[in-house]
Amino acid sequence: MTVDYIIVGLGLAGIAFAEELKEHKKSFVVYEDNSQNSSLVAGGMYNPVVLKRFTPVWNAKAQLEVAIPFYKKLEINFNEKYIFPVDIYRVFKTIEEQNNWFIASDKLLFQDYMIPEITKNDNANIIAPYDLGKLTNTGRIDVKKLISNYRAFLKEEDSLLQEKFDHHKIEFLDKKIKYNNLLSDRIVFCEGFGIKENKFFSYLPMREAKGELITIHAPDLRVDHLIKSAVFVLPLGDDLYKVGATFNWTDKTKIPTKEGRAELESKLNSVINCNYKIVDHTAGIRPTVKDRRPLVGTHPDYKQLSILNGLGTRGVMIAPLMAKKLFQHIEKGVQLEKEISIDRF
Ligand SMILES: Cc1cc2nc3c(=O)[nH]c(=O)nc-3n(C[C@H](O)[C@H](O)[C@H](O)COP(=O)(O)OP(=O)(O)OC[C@H]3O[C@@H](n4cnc5c(N)ncnc54)[C@H](O)[C@@H]3O)c2cc1C
């Protein structure tokens, strides 16, 4: 079998690049094992404001301009809902934070998102003595559902190989790459933390961060927006809420831990005031990079091998734009900006 591209990985990066290939009528197959699951467990939120400091997320405007139409197109193609608008209520910890909110909301970039007035906390089950700052035009992508539908679509097209891709088996022919019985022009690696086992790209400085999340059932909470305080509490419907997330830079497994659960519970108890039951607990590794920028580009020596990785804590917003840039780079020779290109390392 001959294809234009092999994609390794079916998370947000793999799907974004596959969509780029479809749009340009390129043939491809996707390899997927279940070694990584960052996209599957993610909160799936998109939001252009850093909620800790009320500063802009890097390149947020350009990312959102591509990301929202990207998910809308997928909604139409699969006749499914993936985009769920969700306002965010940031719990203020001090008067100073309230003041910083006023100042930030005045910035042109934030005018479509930050509501300048302080929002009174009228829910006795939320602990917010200094009230709340409201963000609008933000939301959640149901990434799990998207991946599940995409997987089914690829299976139908006979374009999915659910097995581990073995980097040692790549044969470099004159103009093509041979992998088992496949001939391809190129391979694009979208492996998330799986990059550590990729002998061609493992030199790149990933500083991965494990994250754990719990899902709670809390019928008395009754909120339809995300609450951001010591943890985020994200409504999923049916009185279910996703609560997260931890950051751990030493544990490299995707196994949920007792410690992670205890940390989330303890923080959650400082955010809400009502009974809840934990109904699920998951973990994944965020593919974060030393300088917090994506890893995009082509291998310096093996020109048929490219990478789309390093989506960090914001894969939902970043993936679609980076996939476009990588495609233009590979097919049209368009130079990548230094801050995203792997040539910076
Ligand atoms: C707890 C948590 C919460 C998060 N919340 C958010 C959020 O609210 N908003 C947001 O935008 N981002 C969030 N993120 C970050 C987001 O999940 C990531 O940026 C994004 O999912 C990374 O996507 P990816 O495709 O690069 O990697 P992954 O989703 O990890 O996908 C990698 C893929 O490669 C496959 N793979 C790897 N190696 C091989 C191999 N050798 N052979 C075959 N297949 C292979 C894996 O099986 C998988 O399919 C969160 C992450 C975590 C962990």
Image (cartoon, rainbow, N blue to C red):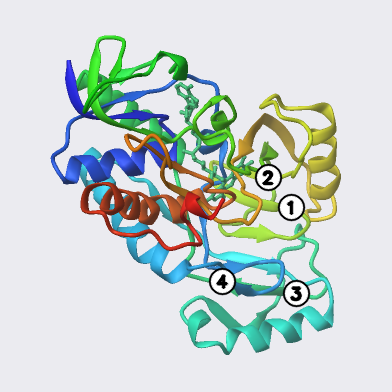
Quarter of the image for the N terminus: give it.
top left
Q: Which residue is mark 3?
A: 131
Measuring 72% from the left and 71% from the top, which residue is drawn there? 121
Callout 3 crowding tier (Cα within 10 Å): few <14, some 14–19, many ≥20? many
Q: Earlier in the sequence, mark 2 or mark 4?
A: 4
Labels 1 and 2 touching (C-beta < 8 A): yes
Q: Give the residue type at disc 1.
A: Val
Residue underneath mark 4: 135
What amino acid is found at the position of numbered circle 4 in the picture? Leu
Q: Upstream in the sequence, badge 3 or badge 2?
A: 3
Up-down: is 51 above or below 98? above
Name the residue located 74 percent from the left edge and 44 percent from the top edge. 247
Look at mark 2 in the image and give the residue it sits on: 243
- Kind of residue at disc 3: Asp
| Alpha carbon distance from label 3 to label 2 | 20 Å
Whether label 3 lies within 8 Å of ligand 1 gets the answer no
Q: Earlier in the sequence, mark 1 or mark 3?
A: 3
Residue 1 is marked as: none
Which of the two discs, 1 and 3, sits closer to the camera?
Answer: 1
Secondary structure category for the residue under label 4: strand
Residue drawn 31% across the image and 10% down it: 180
- Tag 2, which secondary structure? strand
Mark 1 secondary-structure assignment: loop
Image-based side of 24 in relation to 258, left or right = left
Q: Residues within 10 Å of mark 2 (few under 14, many from 20)?
A: many
**Pointer 1 residue:** 231
Q: Which secondary structure lies at badge 3?
A: loop
Q: Alpha-carbon distance for marks 1 and 3?
A: 16 Å
Q: Position of residue 19 (x, y in %)?
A: 26, 42
